[in-house]
Image (cartoon, rainbow, N blue to C red):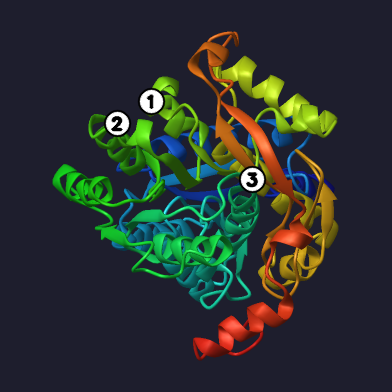
Amino acid sequence: MKRLTATLLLWLGISACVQAAEPITLGLNYPRTGSYKEEGLAQMRGALLAIDELNARGGVLGRPLRLASYDSGSSIDKALRNVDRLAQEGAAMLFGGASSAIAIAAGKRAREHGLLYFGTLTYSNDTTGKDGHRYMFRESNNAWMSARVLGEYLAERFPNQRYFYVTSDYTWGHTTETSLRETTGSQDVARHPGVRVPFPGARLADYRDALTQAAASDAQILALVLFGEDLVRAMRIANDLGLTRRMQVVVPNLTLHMVEQAGPQLMEGVIGTEPWTWRVPELERSERGQAFVAAFVERYQSYPSSSAASAYSIVYQWADAVQRARSLDSEALIRALEGHRYRLLKGEQEWRAFDHQNVQRVYAVRVKPRAEVLKDPLKQDYFEIVHQLDGEQAAPSLLEWQAERRAAGQPPRLL
């Protein structure tokens, strides 16, 4: 009997250890194909680096982390199926993005499963604005934050200029154009016209038609509210039409990969914004950020982009919230995240309580001349920071956020 009891206790102990060591699954819903695939690959790399680092330190709550990932292909239907599949596989939380329309739809589906959704590259105001809810957290800045830092810089350097807008026809494009028009005083569409191109699925003919109209205008600033490969295609056509030499090109949301794909010679002098570049940790004396850059370069032989930094930060912030809450429960994690201030890859950031927007410093950047880029060992030192705004200055206020929600028929608080 004693031997049986000892055997039973041993079996129970082994079972408990196995159960305790069961991996925690994190679900990445990202574009591995389509116009935003380079930004998606960067998210995957950043997430894997964070997970490996955390596992080397013992995991979270004594359990290792594993990544389950599925390709959204910039398709809402595919993204929603991914959310359902990841929930069925037992994912503890979901993250990812590049298309705001997908992040918004996927976040709402995640809420139905009781799972938190962290948006990576989702710049539409709607993500944490009229479409925001308690289960959605956005790590990147919103369109209004980009427009404020960009608008200040353009007003000083290019006052009283005429704009022409070429915009992706979906929520990110709409809210980004609206925000930039407001901060640059270019709301008059007769003086500052624009054309919308389909998303997804725009053809080269769509870009050529839009840019031919820009060439026929008297605009001095060409605002390309495009992203990923869509921006690259448009830049090539704009160059063919001579617009890159005649007009100042503005791209509200730039990434390292967009410049890399188009080439620094074509992108030279383009002005845009970034929430993070690999130079920021050095400039802001962030030792943790510099360590991330070094680890990423060693592993991938490439500098981390803002896409990679966003995914990396999300994994760490989720893990930190779990450790502080001592729980994987979504409601407990919401309480742990709301109002939480931290420093990770740059200066202070905050998960704002009333809208779950990550409030952080944003940067206006200009693409360096090709000759300067080529001096860098990895030939990826693309951006010069030309202006910046602290998060509190850039982000919409509570009153502005509530007004936006009410205008859309939404309650003035997250549900």
Residue type at the position of mark 1: Leu
Q: For the residues marked 3 and 1, what is the alpha-carbon distance in whole angstroms?
A: 23 Å
Quadrant for the C terminus in the image: bottom right
Note whether residue 157 is visible: yes
Element marked by disc 3 = loop
The answer to whether marks 3 and 1 mark residues whose Cβ atoms lie closer than 8 Å is no
Q: Which mark is residue 154?
A: none
Residue to which mark 3 is pinned: 275
Question: Which residue corresponds to the image point at 51% horizontal and 60% vertical from the top-left?
Answer: 180
Residue to which mark 1 is pinned: 266
Number of labels in the image equals 3
How dense is the environment of label 1, judged by Cα within 10 Å: few (below 14), some, or many (20 and up)?
many
Q: Position of residue 310 (x, y in %)?
A: 61, 44
Question: Which residue corresponds to the image point at 45% horizontal and 60% vertical from the top-left?
Answer: 100
Element marked by disc 2 = helix
Please identify the residue farthest to the left as the structure is shown. 205
Q: Which of the two marks, 3 or 1, is nearer to us in this view?
A: 1
Residues 330 and 391: in front is 391
Up/down of 223 relative to 382, above or below = below
Compare marks 3 and 1 and give the one earlier in the sequence: 1
Residue to which mark 2 is pinned: 239
Q: For the residues marked 2 and 3, what is the alpha-carbon distance in whole angstroms?
A: 27 Å
Element marked by disc 1 = helix
Compare marks 1 and 2 and give the one earlier in the sequence: 2
The answer to whether marks 1 and 2 mark residues whose Cβ atoms lie closer than 8 Å is yes
How dense is the environment of label 2, judged by Cα within 10 Å: few (below 14), some, or many (20 and up)?
some
